[in-house]
Amino acid sequence: NAGVTQTPKFRVLKTGQSMTLLCAQDMNHEYMYWYRQDPGMGLRLIHYSVGEGTTAKGEVPDGYNVSRLKKQNFLLGLESAAPSQTSVYFCATRYREETQYFGPGTRLLVL
Amino acid sequence: RKEVEQDPGPFNVPEGATVAFNCTYSNSASQSFFWYRQDCRKEPKLLMSVYSSGNEDGRFTAQLNRASQYISLLIRDSKLSDSATYLCVVNIVNPPNMLTFGGGTRLMVKP
């Protein structure tokens, strides 16, 4: 039982490059979330999903796209990376009214 | 105004001290409340939920004041291992099942 895993753990991109972050969970949770965490800003919600095939925008969705084709996976895409997207990205899952469980994070540096 | 506000600290305390953090939230319709702990370069993890009647878990006590819209966390007999950032988290009603995080309060316990 791995819980919530994120791939990759660390990545360096050049401005304009694209990449996809993968979040995988084996807890059969309906809800999944992508956050970014920046110094002094706390965790900010990018996009979220309340079930397979559904996604919605969070607080800071611009520059990101997501997909939830399978219940266990939630993908976060950056089509054209910008230095402002340098951050730590956390995925989280939640079952109904229970607490959220976080993945270990992905550190992204955009040069 | 941020939806969830915390004093960023740092709070520097000696081992054995008692320390208290407060957090204020702006949405009076908020339904549930939590304290998360985040260690450096790690993911946030649930420390405890906060109930209207107040609740205690070992050295940790959480209180909720709905009238004044604030939440508190008290740590007694601080240990070196308590050094971390403590995140105040609120479940905002709309959209549902979405948590809003405060920026966190950093605690450093010194020998």
Image (tube, helix red, strand yellow):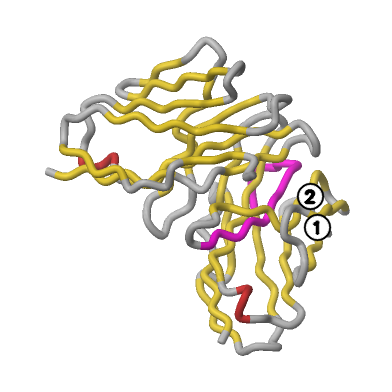
Viewer-side residue, B30 vs A72 = B30
Counting from the top left corner in percent of width and height, residue A38 is at: 53, 62
**What residue is rendered at 54% in x and 65% in y?**
A88
Compared to residue B60, the image places residue B38 above or below, namely below
**What residue is rendered at 40% in x and 17% in y?**
B56
Distance Cα–Cα, label 2 vs label 1: 7 Å
Please state if A31 lies on the left or on the right of A89 as rendered: right
Looking at the rendered structure, which numbered label has been put on residue A68? 1
Looking at the rendered structure, which numbered label has been put on residue A47? none
Viewer-side residue, B31 vs B39 = B31
**Residue highlighted by disc 2:** A49
The segment highlighted magenta reads A25-38
Verify CB contact (< 8 Å) between mark 2 and mark 1.
yes
SS for callout 2: strand
Counting from the top left corner in percent of width and height, residue A108 is at: 55, 74
Kindly report the secondary structure that dominates the magenta region of the rendered protein: strand
Counting from the top left corner in percent of width and height, residue A19 is at: 69, 79
Q: Amino acid at mark 2?
A: Ser
Which chain contains the residue that carries disc 1? A
Q: Nearer the viewer, mark 2 or mark 1?
A: 2
Q: Amino acid at mark 1?
A: Arg
**What residue is rendered at 58% in x and 82% in y?**
A110
**Rendered image quadrant of residue B22:** top left
Please state if A68 lies on the left or on the right of B90 as rendered: right
For the view shown, which residue lies furthest in the right direction?
A53
Q: Quadrant of the C terminus of chain A?
A: bottom right
Compared to residue A31, the image places residue A87 above or below, namely below
**What residue is rendered at 54% in x and 51% in y?**
A2
